[in-house]
Amino acid sequence: MSLSALIQQQIKKHGPITVADYMQLALQHPDYGYYTRNDPLGAKGDFTTAPEISQIFGELIGAWMAMQWEIAGNSGMALVELGPGHGTLMADILRATRKIPDFHDAISVHMVETSPTLKQKQWSTLAGAHLSLHWHDGLDTVPDRPLLLVANEFFDALPIRQYVHTKKGWQERMITLDKEGKLAFTMVAAKPPAALKKLPVSENIYEYSEPSIQVMHMIGTRLKERGGAALIIDYGYTGGTCADTLQAVKAHSFHPVLEAPGAADLSAHVDFDALANAAVTKGAIRFPVAPQGRFLERLGADLRLKALCKDATVAQKSAMISGLERLTSPDAMGDLFKALCVAHPDHPHPDGF
Ligand code: SAH
């Protein structure tokens, strides 16, 4: 049976499902889920992420992490990555910080990952790191130590629900079956989460990711109680939006959202203010969100590029220049992708923001 057929059967029996239920099934179903079955990343996969495009991304984040560790008082800390993909970002972070005195001795490394395929891949990418590495299915089992956390393109994969404030009242966009029995969107009267109730009437869609809020509550609580900083990078928006950002991507192109669930990546743009506010309600502080391009430039991306180009061949040079350009240019990933830092209330304004 296909996942599509399974979902159709479930809707027939129990009625329409939320967009969040659909995302959860499509991405995480134990047998058919996209992340359970596939390796989504790279040229042969469906999409490519910043650490796979340029090593400069992970190297600058490594230097940034070490700076936050120094600010936090050189204490023992848990270095945590949420959704580490191939493990490339963590490998670059660890390589870039190898020579920082005492840093590696002070940290334990924790990878939060649900996909068995990707856990395996991360394990082999990081096999050369002479550090103790730990894997977890969720942040809740990561030891409660001062926190250095990074998440790149993690929150976009967490389920969202979609609400519309119509003249008839609040409605939720759900998934049902059309006359031919195919998956189709429908609107159902709904009670929205409290956070949305203050918003102006709009026939457009408001999105709300409960699982993202829960993760940010956990991060905020740990930062407040134990200290440290968290860096969240993703595609998304600030200032609240009212648009449908649910998207499916397959083989580096957009794909119909309700077609072949489990076979395409499914994601939504990240609501950075909602993430930041969730951490703030638990006592952390937030800094202004920075576009990815500006963030990397402020951390010295150009200097790092120059250093790497010194001993490079012409082909390597041109690949490095175009890789960094893709990460920083406003026409590519420089503006749509953004960086958010939340931290312990005494943490000073970090570089890059
Ligand atoms: N950060 C990586 C990979 C991004 S893809 C990079 O930048 O290359 C999204 C990652 O999050 C994958 O590793 C995926 O398996 C993981 N993931 C998705 N949903 C998750 C969940 N609910 N809990 C833990 N990991 C999850």
Image (cartoon, rainbow, N blue to C red):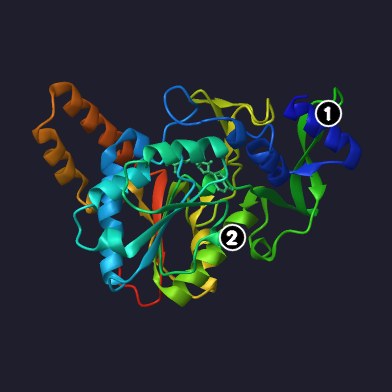
User: Which of the 4 quarters of the picture holds residue 305?
Assistant: top left
Name, please, the residue furthest toward the left: 310
- Where is residue 255? Give x, y as percent: 59, 26
**Is residue 149 toward the left or the right of residue 61 in the image?**
right
69, above or below 294, in the image:
below
Element under disc 1 = loop
- Residue 178 bears which disc, if any? 1
Cα distance between the residues tagged 2 and 1:
32 Å
Q: Where's the C terminus, which quadrant?
A: bottom left
Q: Is residue 346 positioned above or below 76 on the image? A: below
Say left or right for 106 vs 123: left
Q: Given the image, on which type of amino acid does mark 1 rest? A: Asp
Residue 347: percent from left, percent from top: 34, 73
Residue 208, horizontal then vertical, whole percent = 63, 54
Q: Is mark 2 within 8 Å of ligand 1?
A: no
Give the mark nearer the N terminus: 2 vs 1.
1
Q: Is residue 121 visible?
A: yes
Quadrant for the N terminus in the image: top right
Q: Quick one: 237 or 84, which is closer to the camera?
A: 84
Q: Which mark is residue 313?
A: none
Residue drawn at x 65%, y 35% is 33
Residue 308 position within the rendered picture, expressed as x and y whole percent measured from the top left: 15, 37
State the residue position of label 2.
Answer: 213
Residue sitting at x 26%, y 46%: 95
Q: Is residue 350 visible?
A: no
Give the number of the mark in front: 2 or 1.
2
The residue type indicated by label 2 comes to Ile
Of 71 and 189, nearer the camera is 71
Which residue corresponds to the image point at 48% horizontal and 50% vertical from the top-left?
237
